[in-house]
Amino acid sequence: MTTEAQAPADLRAGPREWLGLFVLTLPTILLALDATVLNLAVPHISADLKPTSTELLWTVDIYGFMIAGFLVTMGTLGDRIGRRRLLMIGALGFGLASVLAAKSTSPEMLIAARSLLGITGATLMPSTLALISNMFNNPRQRGVAISVWVTCFSVGIAVGPVLGGALLQWFWWGSVFLLAVPVMVVLVVATPLLIPEYKDTQAGRIDTTSVVLSLVTVLPVIYGIKRLAEHGVDAQAVVILLIGAVFGVLFVLRQRKLADPLLDLRLFSNRAFTTALLVLLLGLGLMGGLYLFITQYLQLVEGLSPITAGLWLLPAAAALIVASSLTPVIAGKVRPGYVVGGALFLSVSGYALISLVDSTDGLPLLVTGFVLVYTGISPMMVLGTDLVVGSAPPQKAGSAAAISETAMEFGIALGIAGLGSLVTAVYQDGIGEALPPGLPESAAHPARDTLAGADAMSDSLGTHVLEQAREAFTNGLNLAAGTAGAIVAVIAVAAMVLLRHVPVGGTEDEEAGEVGDTGDAGEPDGTGEPDGTGEAAPTAEPVTAGDNR
């Protein structure tokens, strides 16, 4: 039986690791940008490629579907072939797919390119997060590194609408995809120089049946949830969700039987891991769901342009960046459960303010409330992610990171579906009686469906009806914010109770390091000697830092 060359828990990262962290933040910023700029480009794509409504929907959605579907597979693949190697392969593929998307000449070509972007994008986030976990063995340094990672994601979200709007004003729609190319070139060149390789040498081959089962579980569930958000409860959505659930059961049963599963279910036996995962899923889901309707409020109720709306979101993004930076300092003195729970209570006050916004003069209250929401969720993102990845054995870091990212994807989809159902129900109830009798169905149907439809039919509806539509939408936003705040308050209490045993700067003493550990966790390739930097080889590093294989 091989043994693992263990790195001391207090081994501190040096300048090379911090420079490497800068490189690892590049794809994080890029993926955050990509999540925001496409929505701005949709009108330009529609005018140029003339897609059908179905093709346009798939253009927007296929990227998220592919990322969610392949995260678990790619995270586990990185554990096996090397996280640095997978990151470089994914970066090269993402750059090429971005060029293909920018040069698309038909809706079908763009959908195919977006699919490739999703598949390759699924390699980036788990790889960067797992590499950070391996490079920063000291718990406090790891917390700071993850806070930087979260902060960079926030920066991407913040500058996305502004940068995307500027590009679309001066260049053609494909320019938003070409943002990825120089970033990926830097990543491919710098990664071998600054990032050591890590993988689990004892892992077996990937079970292809498990890969297929994971895909036919995640993709139908995500699609079904999105359909619920768009159309409400209907037979098609229920059937699709049931299909995903059945395959999900089959997937779990198969993982329990395999000696080397695609997803190690023993990770979930760690209380800190499971609690942090649920807090991330629910907390980010509610925030993500509300974010969608806040952006609609800014543009459709307040009448702001996309760039101006993006600028009004900058204060919240700035608060998230500041809070992310301060979280490791606070967490160095206070237990994570209390930091997360206390901050979530702050976000509850933000949700409460948003629940009071009106349709005529609500912008200051909305912005203030959203600043508080973002400030309150920041410690959850930083410490929750740190607990999920830090609670897993080093050789399972890629799998743990993928689970974390998958939970976030599911959470946001659930948040949009759940809160979207509330907003839609309140809106449709409020607008129904406001529509004048005798209005042609061609104008009445879009107006009844969404506020965007009513705004598009404003010439037919008249000013009074459009004002009623805005008020109905705002009432739905108020209810969604109040509901989200109540749920977040429960999450805050749960975080304080269930994470109260997690000490300052670490995972639960009685559980950490045991979950999923088979005893053959992987060893450095070769002699297990230092990596040439004068320090001992980090945990689960099977390839020396200078090995570019």
Image (spheres, helix red, strand yellow):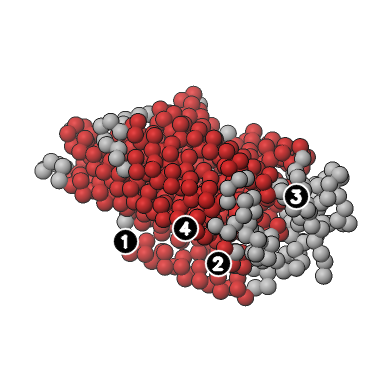
Q: Which residue position is annotated with label 3?
A: 10
Q: Are marks 4 and 2 in contact (CB under 8 Å)?
A: no
Query: Residue 546, image x and y in percent?
Result: 83, 45
Query: Residue 235, image x and y in percent?
Result: 33, 64
Q: Is residue 213 above or below residue 401?
A: below
Which quarter of the figure has residue 202?
bottom right
The amino acid at mark 4 is Ala
Res. 85 in view: no
Mark 1, residues whose alpha carbon is within 10 Å: few (<14), some, or many (≥20)? few
Residue found at the very far front of the displayed protein: 333
Q: Regarding mark 1 in the picture, which secondary structure is present there?
A: loop
The amino acid at mark 2 is Leu
Q: Nearer the viewer, mark 2 or mark 3?
A: 3
Q: Which mark is residue 264?
A: none
The amino acid at mark 3 is Asp
Q: Spatial distance from mark 4 to mark 2, Cα to Cα?
A: 32 Å
Q: Regarding mark 4 in the picture, which secondary structure is present there?
A: helix
Res. 22 in view: yes
Which of marks 3 and 4 precedes in the sequence? 3
Q: Regarding mark 3 in the picture, which secondary structure is present there?
A: loop
Q: Which residue position is annotated with label 1?
A: 234
Mark 4, residues whose alpha carbon is within 10 Å: few (<14), some, or many (≥20)? some
Q: Spatial distance from mark 2 to mark 1, Cα to Cα?
A: 25 Å
Which of marks 1 and 2 precedes in the sequence? 2
Q: Regarding mark 2 in the picture, which secondary structure is present there?
A: helix
Disc tally is 4
Query: Residue 547, image x and y in percent?
Result: 82, 48
Q: Spatial distance from mark 3 to mark 1, Cα to Cα?
A: 55 Å
From the viewer's side, name the closer residue of 284 and 140. 140
